[in-house]
Amino acid sequence: MVPYIVAGDVEDRLDWLTLADALAEGHRAAEPMIRDAFLGRGADTLLSRAAWIDGMGVAVKSVTVMPGNAAHGRATVHGALVLFHDLTGQVEAVIDSGLVTKWKTAADSILGARLLAPTDARRLLIVGTGAVAESLIAAYGAAFPGIEATLWGRNAAKVEALALRHGVAVARDLPAAVTAADIVATATMSSEPVLCGDWLRPGQHLDLIGAYKAGMREADDGCLRRARIFVDSFETTLAHIGELRDPLARGVIARADVLGDLRDLVAGRVGRRDESDITLFKNGGGAHLDLMSAQVILKAWRDGPNFG
């Protein structure tokens, strides 16, 4: 029987560094075939992402994003990933999309940070109060032992509650908190920039996660002009994510200013040049990353008591 895997089945056997290492190794494998499809109804979105990596397998993840659900106490994102065997095409597993997205998203970011952020980073600012922001506290803590996390968000009650759960500080002044941080990670649903280039200082690393549609931005034009820009995948970020699509269309930056993706970074072809660089990593979270993460999750399930 094909398993339907949820968080309770495997999370006690998953860890952030294993996921990040698996993503790095996946970028040494065959070039992925990737396709994204978006359907929309106002603010509501159906996002379907598919990837095939020769030798690894095939994954299709479909999720609905319904922002209006929050007002009624319902989750805003629902979906599932179907994992197919590379050679036979048989369904190997169906995995809850939230489980895949949680581990994929934060692992993607910490892989980017391990390759781009200053190695002595000690101060992390997380902008956002949702599930991704919560995952980042643990993921960055694993990738940068001893790092001090601070949270900022527009909803004071949510920020305080999240900070209390994890024993981290709350920032009251966003510009000052950005300037003080070595790493700034944004995980918002914002359509307008929340980061300003004037707040940045040499040596910082920006990890931009939230924007996933053409009308969304988290960093302003000043950030892009000041930073050395990298992405997790050219194919999944440049054409439809507003963080890059908008400034590229307006000539704020040129295509040549996007210096490399994770395949380039993992191979050592590009990266941070010196301690004064401001690096910017756009986490687009493509389906190839879902596939790599799903394989780790399936292995964890097979290694557990539910298999065999």
Image (cartoon, helix red, strand yellow):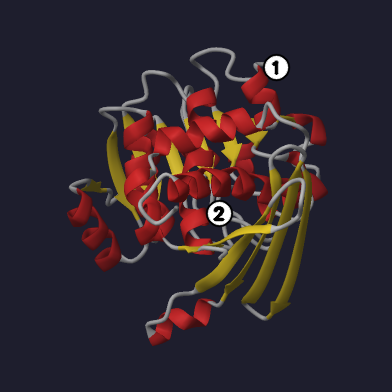
Depth order, front residue of 38/17: 17
Sequence-wise, the earlier of marks 1 and 2 is 2
The local crowd at label 2, few if under 14, some if 14 to 19, many if 20 or more residues have their Cα within 10 Å, is some
* Viewer-proximal residue among 265 and 50: 50
Instruction: Identify the mark at residue 269; answer none if there is no mark.
Output: 1
Q: Is residue 230 above or below residue 192?
A: above
Could you say where residue 69 lies in the image, as x and y percent from the top left?
A: 47, 82
In the orientation shown, which residue stands out farthest toward the top?
A: 274
Q: Position of residue 161 (x, y in %)?
A: 22, 62
- Number of other residues with Cα within 10 Å of mark 1, as a class: few under 14, some 14 to 19, many 20 or more: few
Residue 278 falls in image quadrant: top right
Which residue: 70% across, 17% down?
Answer: 269
Depth check, front residue: 240 or 268: 268
- Residue at the image position 74 percent from the left and 68 percent from the top: 38
The kind of secondary structure element at disc 1 is loop
Name the quarter where the N terminus is drawn. Answer: bottom right
Apparent side of residue 102 relative to residue 220 in the rendered image (left or right):
left
Residue marked by disc 2: 193
Residue 169 x, y percent position in the rendering: 22, 46
Separation of residues labelled 1 and 2 (CA atoms):
30 Å
List the single residue furthest toward the bottom: 72
Q: Relative to the observer, which residue lies in front, 175 or 15?
A: 15
Q: Looking at the picture, does residue 246 appear above or below residue 31? A: below
Please tell me whether mark 1 or mark 2 is closer to you in this view.
1
Q: What number is the disc on residue 156?
A: none
| Residue drawn at point x = 67 percent, y = 67 percent | 47
Q: How many marks?
A: 2
Amino acid identity at mark 1: Arg
